């Protein structure tokens, strides 16, 4: 396998060169676990392998429909001439039911925002 590793992994003309364990296993027609074991001891594979972090996230509790909303304002001012003067979209997602509301707005003044929320 070491001879095959040198000819397949370190040869730039080979499509599996410096590609990873799966590409090396398919090009050499060998088992995946054996290719993985060979690559782990190689410096180019271990030095440039990206580390995947698992970030802890806050838990979000929603006790019913319309209990918690996620809101965002989408700016579409560059498309206002094609959308009858609507420059913004107020997007609201209900966390419990995953239902989404979209309300078009011509401006983002406090009066327009209040009227949009009152429509719901």
Image (cartoon, grey):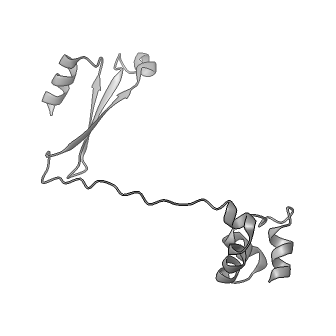
Residue at horizontal 82 percent and vertical 72 percent from the top: 8
Q: Which x, y percent locates residue 58?
A: 29, 53
Image quadrant of residue 44? bottom right
| Quadrant position of the C terminus in the picture | top left
Q: Residue at x 68, y 59 (%)?
A: 48
Residue at point 18%, 45% (across, down): 68
Residue 81 horizontal side relative to residue 19, left or right: left
- Residue 66: % across, % down: 14, 45
Q: Quadrant of the N terminus?
A: bottom right
Above or below, 5 relative to 47: below
Q: Is residue 65 above or below residue 83?
A: below
Q: Depth check: give the residue in front, 92 or 37.
A: 37
Residue 4 in sight here: yes
Whether residue 19 appears in this view of the structure is no
Side of 9 where 115 appears, left or right: left
Where is residue 10, by image quadrant? bottom right
As drawn, 106 above or below 14: above
Q: Left or right: where does residue 45 sit relative to residue 56? A: right
93 w.r.t. 76: above or below: below
Residue 56 in the image: state x and y as whole percent: 36, 58
């Amino acid at each position: 396998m070491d001879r095959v590793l040198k000819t397949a992994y370190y040869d730039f003309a080979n499509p599996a060169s410096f590609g990873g364990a799966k590409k090396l296993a398919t090009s050499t027609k060998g088992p995946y676990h054996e290719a993985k074991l060979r690559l782990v001891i190689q410096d180019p594979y271990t030095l440039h392998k990206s580390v995947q972090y698992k970030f802890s996230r806050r838990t979000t509790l929603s006790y019913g429909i319309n209990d918690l909303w996620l809101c965002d304002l989408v700016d579409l001012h560059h498309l206002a001439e094609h959308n009858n003067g609507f420059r913004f979209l107020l997007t609201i997602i209900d966390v419990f039911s995953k239902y989404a509301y979209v309300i078009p707005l011509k401006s983002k003044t406090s009066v327009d925002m209040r009227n949009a929320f009152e429509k719901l």
